[in-house]
Image (cartoon, coloured by chain):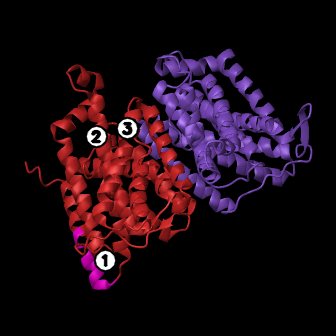
Chain colours: A red, B purple
Amino acid sequence: MNKLLTARNGFVAVLVAFLLALPLYTAMTGNSFLLTLFTRILILAMAATSLNLIMGFGGMVSFGHAAYLGVGGYVVGILAYEGVSSGFLQWPLAIAVSALFALVIGALSLRTRGVYFIMITLAFAQMIYYVGVSLNRYGADDGLTIQRRSQFAGLLDLSNRTIFYYVCLALLFGTIYLVWRLINSRFGLVIQGARSNDRRMRSIGFPAFRYRLVCFVIAGAMCGLAGVLLANFTNFISPAMMHWTRSGDLIVMVVLGGMGSVFGPAIGAIALLLLEESLSRFTEYWQIILGPLLLAVVLFARGGIDGVLARIGRG
Amino acid sequence: MLLFIEQCLNGLQFGLLLFLLAAGLTLVFGIMDLVNLAHGSLYMLGAYFAATFAALTDSFLLGILLGLAATLVVGMTVEVVALRRLYGRDHLDHVLGTFGLILFFNEVVRFFWGPAGLNLPLPSWLNRSIEVLPGVPYSAYRFSIIVVALVVAFLLYVVVMRTRIGMLIRAGASNREMVSALGVNIQLLYTLVFGLGAALAGLAGIMQAPILTAQIGMGENILILAFVVIIIGGIGSIRGALVASMFVGLVDTVGRAFLPDLLKLFLTPAAASTAGPALSSMLIYVLMAIVLVVRPEGLFPAARR
């Protein structure tokens, strides 16, 4: 039995090799379109991976996860606007503020379950969205242009496309690795246990609420970091970063790729965004195809793309 | 004072409009346990259908009737073709599938009607102002929305609580297998309930169309509000939806109208004009968060199953 050689692992290996080699293609052909597209994909894949930590493993379906993208992005944007462009200051602060938001939102939201949880997280995200809309000093509805990407004292030049791509790729791999380590740790087992049977976890002595809350905060902080990258990537922040449809997109990526699988969300993000990109070249009305396709995935491909790959592996 | 009464009436009207949307949503949610994000698409389709038929037949009322019928048909078709297969699945599957439907319907509308909005002009007998209370003039059309919505709410109550079909619907909500074992075609019943919900959403869209134009994406924004309503009211409870929708409508409308002025009492004018609009947009979400923190299952939780 060679457990390593499954369809799923093969697919992931090919994908990783492709992602690592992509800048070479750009360097050879000078065509930077793919690199830009994939930088955006990597960033959103990171956000989807962080959502998967709470949604796939913790059973906490947050419909407001894009809020942390916004919070992370706004911290960078506001600091840059106020003249602080050092990444050493911007990035940790953005992560800390996202974590703080997640702590407050989580502490209140985790009292509810199921659909109520979905909706209360949405409500908090909408509140933060409207705060963004009301920030007149920082562009309100129209958003704010960031003049300079985060500076790392000459160590990292983020304005270089290739370097920025590799930074995003490294952070995505880092996030996936962290999620993988987390879910296989004692902490992760408690989280997954609480998803399956909350009462039992509590009766054998685990404060499930506190474990959940910590998990929620970690995911928020990770997504905040993705927001930092997104703001740096687009050189722009606006409330649209945290519109509720963005939260919906993230959920779609996770479910499409395969919920509760470590690589699933990244695969889902790549699949969804590539599909959008290629369909939109094919016809202006590409959503007429994408919509029913998503429905078909739900109806016929349970467990998303990762689920299909796992089934192929089993033969 | 006059302004206050008028804003309260506007709030009531908006709330009742939300109720029509939320009633369908909560029926489908409470009975079939289906999270239908595409409910807002049916609201949009209702508006477009009515505007088109009104222009074709040159009659406002005929346009509304045909628009309603068309929305009903589309709703039942969607149920039969796609959503029927989603019952009993995970809520996340519903979210993903109906999210796909939203994309589809938005694009279909753009394909057939183009990206620009569509107007539904009011006939002259509605396009005037009447005196609802002595000395209080109010738009006849908005007042008619209040009347129609109240009548529909009453009819809905009668149908669900006082008729045989309503009894079957309630029975189907509590125990699907048992009802079908007793020889009731539960599948047909569900299709009917979904069609009813679709028609209610369509009616809301149709009535909103003359006030705002029919637009692509109009459904998404109000859908969120409808979800807020059914969460505050308690999922599956029509009574809860009625109370919560009026509450949300009033808080939202009155808040938008008076909160900025109210803030000026405490803050500098500049700060008040910044915080006012943001705070009033946030108000209902704050309300919902408070309700959920205090009562995690809404104000009127449906009876335990």
Q: Which residues are magenta?
A: A20-30
Q: Residue furthest bottom?
A: A29
By secondary structure, the bulk of the magenta-drawn segment is best described as helix
- Residue A293, image x and y in percent? 45, 54
Measured in 3D between alpha carbons, the distance from the residue under mark 2 to the one under mark 3, in whole angstroms, is 9 Å
Residue closest to the eye, A20 or B84: A20
Is residue A82 placed above or below B81 in the rendered structure? Answer: below
Q: Earlier in the sequence, mark 3 or mark 1?
A: 3
Q: In the visual, does B297 lie left or right of A224? A: right
Compute the Cα span from label 3 to label 1: 37 Å
- Secondary structure type for disc 2: helix
Please tell me which residue lies in front, A303 or A82. A82
Q: Where B27 falls versus B49 (above or below)?
A: above
Q: Which residue is mark 3?
A: A106
| x and y percentages locating residue B2 in the rendered image | 83, 37
Q: Chain of mark 3?
A: A
Say few, some or many: other residues with alpha carbon within 10 Å of mark 1 (under 14 / 14 to 19 / 20 or more): few
Q: Are marks 3 and 1 on the same chain?
A: yes
* Residue B148 falls inside the magenta stretch: no
Q: Are marks 3 and 1 in contact (CB under 8 Å)?
A: no
Tell me the tag on residue A215. Answer: 2
